[in-house]
Image: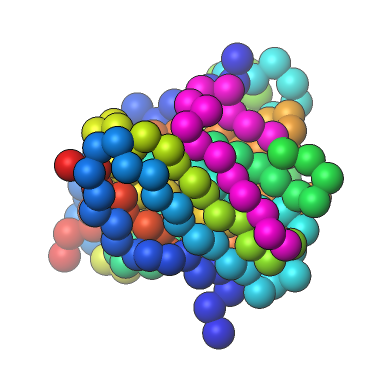
Amino acid sequence: AQRVTQPEKLLSVFKGAPVELKCNYSYSGSPELFWYVQYSRQRLQLLLRHISRESIKGFTADLNKGETSFHLKKPFAQEEDSAMYYCALRTAGNMLTFGGGTRLMVKP
Amino acid sequence: DTAVSQTPKYLVTQMGNDKSIKCEQNLGHDTMYWYKQDSKKFLKIMFSYNNKELIINETVPNRFSPKSPDKAHLNLHINSLELGDSAVYFCASSRRDRVAEAFFGQGTRLTVV
């Protein structure tokens, strides 16, 4: 069965510190992974996807099939990065399976 | 213009009642979804629906049913509400081949007392 695990419910860092939000997945097929972000009082929105290998708002994520991971990284956290982050896996039936989410708090 | 709108934003109701949450999208998407976010912030897909196919997450009780009067709407009906149904319910829409680019609504906070 497919599963997405985000081991940290809360991650607190100081402004300017590096950030890594962990995501591990379990899926028998070819994985397609994404990161979503939900800022306070805003909608959940797509942040980035592994296929495009892009950097959005300074965030990057690399799919590591050997470790079945898709960790989200940013070298220097900003206060405006504080939000809820979800890792998601696209599965059969064109659906998304989400991890439990990690709340990132960036302190001044 | 709100792309995906849900009503009501808040819903408080008693156990055993039947309630509906409405969702409308004006993006011209052909697929709509319902997600449940529980008190621990876990976000789970409940349904995926386009005009040809309804896909149901097997963990969803059959007290929950989606109703789509037209392509722009996917309402969520819940019968015999239980305390454990308390959660935030999110509607979303996308093109069928672009599930990752789904546009989410602001959510409906359902509280069952």
Q: Is residue B84 above or below residue A11?
A: above
Task: Say left or right for A18 vs B24.
Answer: left
Q: Percent from the top left, x then y, of residue A106?
A: 23, 57
Q: Is residue B22 above or below residue A19?
A: below
Q: Nearer the viewer, residue B72 or A106?
A: B72
Q: Nearer the viewer, residue B21 or A16?
A: B21
Based on the picture, tell me whether residue B58 belongs to the magenta stretch. yes
Name which quarter of the figure residue B46 lies in.
Answer: top right
Name which quarter of the figure residue A21 lies in.
Answer: top left
Q: Percent from the top left, x then y, of residue A30?
A: 75, 26
Task: Say left or right for B97 vs A72.
Answer: right
Q: Residue at x 29, y 61 (%)?
A: B10
Q: Residue at x 59, y 62 (%)?
A: B103
Based on the picture, tell me whether residue A10 belongs to the magenta stretch. no
The answer to whether residue A46 is visible is no
Q: Residue at x 66, y 38 (%)?
A: A95
Q: Percent from the top left, x then y, of residue B6?
A: 47, 65
Q: Which residues are magenta?
A: B55-70
Q: Is residue A83 above or below residue B27?
A: above
